[in-house]
Amino acid sequence: MDNLAELLHGFTIAVTVPHLALMVVGVLLGILVGVLPGLGAPNGVSLLLPLTFGMQPVSAIILLSSMYWGALFGGSVTSILFNIPGEPSSVATTFDGYPMARDGRPTTALATAFGSAAIGALVGVILITFLASWVAEVALAFGPAEYFAVYFLAFASFVGMGGAAPIKTVVALAIGFAIAAIGIDTVSGSVRLTMGVDELVKGVSFVVAVMGLFGIGELLVAVEEEFHARAVSSKIDWAEVFRAVGRLPRHGVALLRSAAIGCWMGITPGGPTAASFMSYGIARRFSRRGRYFGTGEVEGIISPETADHAAGTSALLPMLSLGIPGSATAAVMMGGLMIWGLNPGPMLFVDQKDFVWGLIASMYVGNIVAVALVLLTVPVFAALMRIPFVVIAPLIVIICVVGAYSVSNSYLDVVMMLGFGVVGYLFKKLFYPLAPLVLAIVIGDKAEDAFRQSMLMSRGSLGIFFANKLVTCLIVAGIALLLLPLVLQLARLWRKPASAAAETTAQEKVII
Amino acid sequence: MISRRTLELATAILTGGFGVAVVVQSLDNGIGWSSAGVDAGTFPFLTGIIIVVGSLYNLVRGVLPVATLANVPIAITPIELRRLAGLFVPAAIFVAAIPLAGMYVASALYVFAVLAIPRHQSVPRALTMAGATAFALYVVFERAFQVSLPHGALAAALGF
């Protein structure tokens, strides 16, 4: 009941005219970056970040999180109307969304997608409302060893469940850690890994990495396949919106299952992209109409959309209560929290009640605002897609350049951003996952500090990670997740040597 | 034409090279245990080793004729390569021009060049868009958010 009282207090913070205005602005900007291929939620949020430094933290997080909701919805619009996913997480929506829209039912497809997305988001927020403060309470008792164990578990779950080739995930993670270590070491004060470039003493900001990896990298991938926007009609038939939403309860099982998958993948850092693919795959296997999937099935839209939004929302739970972001965008937001002077983690629930509950309340309101705005603006943003890509591409390049520069007024950052762009392109092309890389850049320092503090406490003995039940469980679970791909591979080889390779290809298709 | 294998190899060498650089650099900070606890170089050293080992594994997987790679022999076709270069080369020139020309002039020239030279847009339209881009940047950053973008050596020489 405490939570409900706090939540009501949160609503008094979130539902004020300035904050509602921020939500509208955030959602509209979010839909914009969601619609534009080459700009995604991580970029959009990091672009806005420098502009929030003068704001109250709670206003800033409402703006950024609203942008996130907008981007999640915006990605679905282009998936359905143009067969072009504006966001990686809405790729799975194209499978059934576009065929349905092409068959002359664009309103049904859009309304089904938004309706189930809203339900997914709602489940995610409810989960946060009831679980976040409890998790934070447990985490308050954590020492450095427990923290390191939780970080370890988070990173291990990327390797075990991320879906990408495990060794590629490990390499991406380790590169992120190394980049996080560049600059002044917070414990000893010595300068590390500057490679002879004095300017690197300030370190490499995650914003620079995100601009390059997700902005320029995504753009290079997009320009390769010169797509033509062949839009189906983008007129909205309002009566059909309500009919389509009214039909959603018939697919209750699919909704609940997808929301559960989404929440699970969001809390363990699998991310929305993996969640939507997994949910689509499972729905195809279990649905009675599974063999019609791909031709415009309702459940083929419901499953990825619900899971996508449930994962996107619940990715904020570990960020708030443990200081471990569940997705790339959440990682960027967490970077923002640290810049605003807040310390992400359980202490937020004690020291910054207004911030936490204001944010949680704003998630309820923000998603309603997002659904309304996205339906109202579909024709506008659909028209935007008719602007030729050659015009949009240089503008996105300029946005990324200016964004990277404005982080710390450094030209070197711009050059590095371009370098990260090339890396991002190569990684995308070869199925190296980008989310763990960003995650490691943001929380690498904290993980290292936790490790070194626990080593200090134990005078160099690794035994501290097995000192009590909790920490042992976390470490063992982490190791199990790390070994999971290896075990699966061995089991597969043992059963059917030939099918192992085919499975890998299928996996690669899934993580695009 | 660039094969998937070449791309895998190049990326593995790139990541491995970075790993080696990390390992070498972290040795300067000391690895192991000292009176102050774990030395500053230890953690980067370990991540460097992981990067090198992982890259070697990816390198070997890239070389071996594994079924997965055989399925996609071509990663980038010549047409795609031309499109990539068409985006990246102007962008790189744009970034290189910033210290000299400044953000506003460089971005206006960049927009004009990519739109007018391949004749995607008519010259007057390209000029308008270039001007609008620079103006929008000026209004949003210099005026609204008081973030000073680089004006460039040229502007400094002219006394701006």
Image (cartoon, coloured by chain):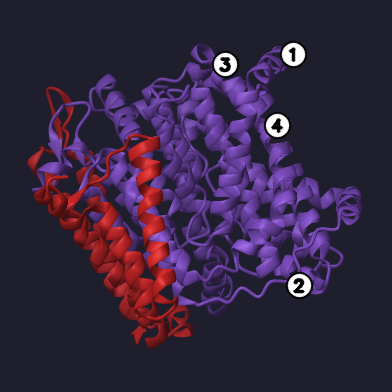
Chain colours: A purple, B red
SS at mark 3 in the image: helix
Kind of residue at disc 2? Pro
Kind of residue at disc 1? Met
Kind of residue at disc 3? Asp
Name the N-terminal-most of marks 3 and 4: 3
A142 or A510: nearer the viewer: A510
The residue located at (43%, 80%) in the rendering is B69
- Are discs 3 and 4 less than 8 Å apart at CB? no
- CA distance separating discs 2 and 3: 45 Å
- CA distance separating discs 3 and 1: 17 Å
Give me the disc on residue A354. 3
Q: Is residue A141 visible?
A: yes
Name the N-terminal-most of marks 1 and 2: 1
The residue under label 4 is A365
The residue located at (35%, 54%) in the rendering is B134
Task: Name the chain letter of the residue that bears numbered label 1.
Answer: A
Crowd around label 2: few <14 · some 14–19 · many ≥20 (10 Å): many
